[in-house]
Amino acid sequence: MASSTSLFNRMVRAAKLQPGLYEEVEADKAATSQALLVVILVSVATGVGHGLEALLISGGGRFIYGLMYGVAAAITGWLLWALFAYILGVSILKGPQTSSTWGELLRTMGFASTPGLLRVFAFIPVVGGVIAFVGSVWRLIATIIAVRQALDFSTWRGIIVTFVGWVLYMVLISLMRMLASGITPTLV
């Protein structure tokens, strides 16, 4: 029987949205490397799904590029989203019971990405997009639970911190992409 702290067991419990798992990894500093591995596995699954989709559509050699970009983007996204959630959660939207570290959010949010493994099926015509979407929504729900548990929040406060953190992350990534492409953002 698998140990309750094995990577596979923890991923299954994360996918089952078990609050106890998120409390467990929040407290286990040794679980940071496992959380990183979950993020890498999900990003590889995402890259494979989209890479296979690109091969089916264009037959081009974008598979390896997409895979490598996907892994790098997923790790960066995990770090930034957790950082924004941490800043919001322990300062601006701090609750009466809030006591957390960035590492605790990294661990819980890393395991919350587990349902993103479903993105490997993105290449399947018609249903692949639906499966990937379901995985994304499932991951979002898991992230709300992860944030709620790590920051000792109510569910509503967890929802707000999760969404605002995600929006801030997406705005930053969009600005970085625009700057990298040579487009200068203008304010109207």
Image (cartoon, rainbow, N blue to C red):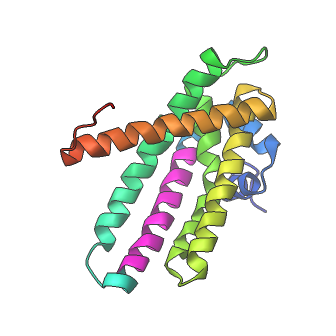
Determine the image quadrant of residue 82. top right
Query: Where is residue 66 shown, x and y percent of the image?
Result: 34, 65
Q: Image check: 37 left or right of 179?
A: right
Q: Is residue 29 visible?
A: no
Is residue 36 highlighted in magenta?
A: yes
Query: Where is residue 57 shown, x and y percent of the image?
Result: 37, 83
- Give the main secondary structure of the magenta stretch: helix
Residue at 46% from the left image edge and 42% from the top image edge:
170
* Relative height, residue 65 to residue 110 (above, below): below
Query: Where is residue 4 shown, x and y percent of the image?
Result: 76, 51
Residue at 55% from the left image edge and 22% from the top image edge:
87
Q: Image check: 16 left or right of 187?
A: right
Question: Magenta part of the protein: which range?
Answer: 34-54
Pick whichever, 21 or 98, lies toward us. 98
Determine the image quadrant of residue 157. top right
The quadrant in which the N terminus is found is: bottom right
* Relative height, residue 146 to residue 70 (above, below): above
Residue at 52% from the left image edge and 74% from the top image edge:
122
Q: Is residue 68 visible?
A: yes
Pick whichever, 148 or 173, lies toward us. 173
Q: Image check: 36 left or right of 2?
A: left
Pick whichever, 153 or 10, lies toward us. 153
The quadrant in which the C terminus is found is: top left
